[in-house]
Image (cartoon, rainbow, N blue to C red):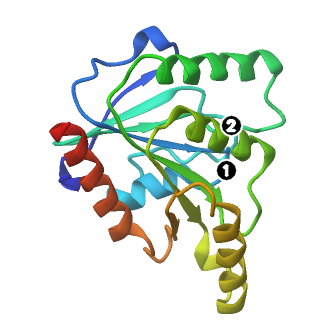
Amino acid sequence: MKIESAKFEMSAGKSEQLPVPDLPEIVFSGKSNVGKSSLINKLLNRKALARVSSQPGKTATINFYRLDSCRLVDLPGYGYAKVSRAEKLRWAELVDGYFNAERPVALIVQIIDIRHDPTEDDEQMINFLLDSGFPFLVAATKSDKLNVTQRKDRMAALTEMFSGTNAELVPFSALKGEGVELLRSRIDASCEDTVND
């Protein structure tokens, strides 16, 4: 993955607008305000390629970023209470449409906030990933906001929570860069596996 090749490709507000599935896709999933756009920007070493919204729940489209060897897929954040029920249903249909479209999904990066236990929405998404058999790992963002003891305790708690899933847990900080190289290497390996299958 040549990060310098990254460019915004398109946004899809309906499942029929999805781009031609011609590259392995790395999917980013997480609740609103979990640091998804910041993580993508840090991975790509860009300040504002992925749009960081000041208002949670604002990204109501699937955003696609094209690189030389893969496509990054930024799903709309879920779980924001102030969004109308109709809008939540539209988002659910859009995301379901993506997953049901037989896309070449190489890896899903499920994002949670390291400081908190997964929400009910997080758990629903993780259960969906487990049931569907998609390869995924868990990125625990905002690791820089904890001191050494807090971080150790939270990592132990999260490791215990995910012990039955075989999902790798990657602590991540968009501020300090923790987890960036590890995530890049996992993405590269997943793309190679998809191409070789």
Q: Position of residue 183 (x, y in %)?
A: 38, 62
Vertical position of residue 194 compared to residue 1: above or below: above
Mark 1–mark 2 Cα distance, whole angstroms, equals: 9 Å
Seen at 73% across and 23% down, the residue is: 88
Rendered image: mark on residue 193: none
Front residue (pair 44, 152): 152
Q: Provide the secondary structure element on which disc 2 rests.
A: loop
Q: Looking at the image, tell me whether mark 1 or mark 2 is earlier in sequence order.
A: 1
Vertical position of residue 181 compared to residue 197: above or below: below
Q: Provide the secondary structure element on which disc 1 rests.
A: loop
Residue type at the position of mark 2: Tyr
Graded by Cα atoms within 10 Å as few (under 14), some (14 to 19) or many (20 or more), the crowding at tag 2 reads: many
Badge 2 is on which residue?
78
Badge 1 is on which residue?
33
Seen at 83% across and 34% down, the residue is: 82
Q: Quadrant of the C terminus?
A: top left
- Residue 59 visible to an observer of this rendering: yes
Say whether residue 168 is left or right of residue 182: right
Instruction: Looking at this view, name the residue that lies furthest to the top.
Output: 16
Q: Nearer the viewer, mark 1 or mark 2?
A: 2
